[in-house]
Image: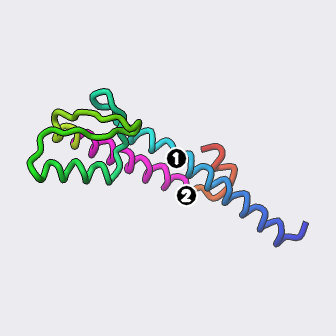
Amino acid sequence: MDERLQKALEFSNYNLTFTNQKQSIKNRVKQIQIVHHNGGVFSAEPALISFVKTLLDIGKEDGVLIDEKENPIEIKNLQDFFDILISAYTSATTEYENEYNKLKKMRSIKKIMDW
C-alpha cells in the first residue's frame, strides 16, 4: 500500500477511535450530572442551574420544577437543590476535563483502546 494512503488510513482510524472514546467520556459525564431529588430525576445543566438561581434571586424558597421525565416535582428547599446541582455539575465537568486531557495525550489507537 502507498505510504501516504497508509498514513491517511491510520489517521482516519485514529480519529474515529478518538471520537468514539470522547463520546464514551461524554456519556459517563452525563451520568454524573443526574440528580435524584424528591422523587424526581434532574440533569445538572446550566439552564436548570440558572433557572433555580433566578428563583432564589427573586426570593423564592420553594417551587415546582418539571423533571427529565416531565413530571412536576415540588422542591421544598431551592437553596439545597441549587447546591446539589452545582456540586453535580462541577463534579461532572471536572471529570470531563480530566478524562479528555488524558485522551488528548494518547497519540495512537493502541494507547486509546488500552485506556
Q: Mark 1: which amino acid? A: Ile
Give the vertical position of 4 relative to 44 (above or below). Answer: below
Left or right: 5 as drawn, with respect to 49: right
Q: Residue at x 68, y 56 (%)?
A: 16
Q: Residue at x 39, y 45 (%)?
A: 92
Q: Residue at x 32, y 42 (%)?
A: 88
Residue 82 sits in which quadrant?
top left
Closer mark to the observer between disc 2 and disc 1? 1
Q: What is the CA distance from the residue labelled 2 to the residue labelled 1?
A: 15 Å
Local packing at callout 2 (Cα closer than 10 Å; few below 14, some 14-19, many 20+) is few
x and y percentages locating residue 68 in the rendered image: 39, 39
Any mark on residue 12, and which?
none
Q: Nearer the viewer, residue 24 or 35?
A: 35
Give the vertical position of 75 relative to 48 (above or below). Answer: above
Q: Nearer the viewer, residue 96 or 6?
A: 96
Residue sitting farthest toward the bottom: 4
Residue 104 sits in which quadrant?
bottom right
Magenta span of residues:
83-103
Any mark on residue 25, and which?
1
| Quadrant of image for the C terminus | top right
Is most of the magenta stretch helix, strand or loop?
helix
Q: Is 93 colored magenta in this rendering?
A: yes
Instruction: Report the number of numbered marks.
Output: 2
x and y percentages locating residue 52 in the rendered image: 22, 47
From the image, tell me which residue sits under label 2: 105
x and y percentages locating residue 43 in the rendered image: 37, 42
Left or right: 50 as drawn, with respect to 31: left
Q: Element under label 2? A: helix
Q: Mark 2: which amino acid? A: Lys
